[in-house]
Image: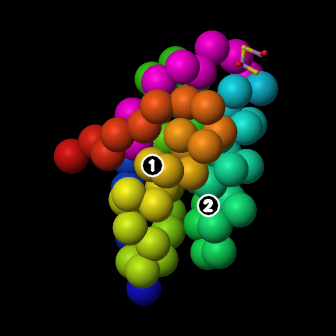
Amino acid sequence: EVTTTDLAVGGMTCAACVSRVEKRLARIAGVSAGVNLATGRARVVHPVEVGAAELVAAVERAGYTAEPVP
Ligand code: 9UX
């Protein structure tokens, strides 16, 4: 079972930042992500077993901030 989580990502200023965040999230098994630089949002499709905290941690490890958008 998969679900979708939107994250507000801080610190992205260029297209390479977008790629970094997308790739970092995609390293988690079963996860795919699309990042919108203009809105600063990441839409993440992920297994329900992968919690929002894990997604946030992955983005932070890439050097950006993240928080789930309700
Ligand atoms: Mo280019 Mo985005 O150095 O941090 S990857 S601004």
From the top left corner, tell me how far across and down residue 20 is, in percent: 73, 38
Q: Residue at x 47, y 24 (%)?
A: 10
Left of 69 or right of it: where is 66? right
- Tell me the amino acid under the disc marked 1: Val
From the top left corner, tell me how far across and down residue 1 is, in percent: 42, 85
Task: List the residue tagged with mark 1.
Answer: 56
- Secondary structure, mark 1, is helix
Q: Ligand 1 within 8 A of label 2's CB?
A: no
From the top left corner, tell me how far across and down residue 19 is, in percent: 74, 37
Q: In this view, does 15 lie above or below 43?
A: above
Q: In this view, does 68 lie above or below 32?
A: above
Residues drawn in magenta = 7-15
Q: Which residue is drawn at 46% across and 61% down?
A: 54
Which quadrant of the figure has residue 62?
Answer: top right
Whether residue 39 is visible, yes or no, is yes
Furthest-left residue in view? Answer: 70
**Ligand 1 quadrant assignment:** top right
Task: List the residue tagged with mark 2.
Answer: 32
Asked which colour scheme the image uses, the reply is: rainbow
Q: Is residue 31 above or below residue 18?
A: below
- Secondary structure, mark 2, is strand
- Tell me the amino acid under the disc marked 2: Ser
Whether residue 34 is visible, yes or no, is no
Residue 68 sits inside the magenta stretch? no
Q: How crowded is mark 1: few (under 14 residues within 10 Å), some or many (20 or more)?
A: some
Left of 17 or right of it: where is 9? left
Q: Earlier along the polypeptide chain: callout 2 or callout 1?
A: 2
Q: Ligand 1 within 8 A of label 1's CB?
A: no
Left of 47 or right of it: where is 70? left
**Between marks 2 and 1, how big is the CA–CA gap?**
14 Å
